[in-house]
Image: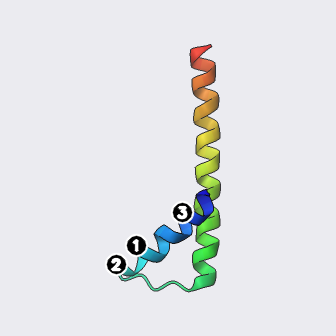
Amino acid sequence: MDYALAVATQLAVFPAFGLCVGVAENFGLGLIFAAVSLIRDYALRRLFNRWIL
């Protein structure tokens, strides 16, 4: 889900800012953004679990 949202957002937003990126680059960037998002979610979950318990 994160990956699809990242790629869809890029396809919509990049042209609005004048960025010309190919499809392969969009998929690569989407993969990076999705990985960062998953790592961030995991770290925040662990932080709050430690803080609450």
User: Which tag, 3 or 1, sits closer to the chain's start?
Assistant: 3
In the image, 10: left or right of 49? left
Reading the image, the residue beneath label 3 is: 5
Residue at image position (57%, 76%) is 26
Return the residue found at the far top.
Answer: 53
User: Which tag, 3 or 2, sits closer to the chain's start?
Assistant: 3
Could you say where residue 44 lies in the image, as x and y percent from the top left? Answer: 57, 34
- Residue 33, by quadrant, is bottom right
Mark on residue 13?
1
The N terminus: image quadrant: bottom right
Callout 3: 10 Å neighbours few (<14), some, many (20+)?
A: few
Q: CA distance from mark 3 to mark 1?
A: 12 Å
| Amino acid at the residue labelled 3 | Leu
Could you say where residue 12 lies in the image, as x and y percent from the top left? Answer: 42, 75
| Amino acid at the residue labelled 1 | Val
Whether pointer 2 and pointer 1 mark residues with C-beta atoms closer than 8 Å, the reply is: yes
Residue at image position (47%, 68%) is 9
Reading the image, the residue beneath label 2 is: 16
From this view, report whether residue 18 is shown above or below residue 45: below
From this view, report whether residue 12 is shown above or below residue 5: below
Residue at image position (64%, 29%) is 46
Q: Element under label 2?
A: helix
Mark on residue 22?
none
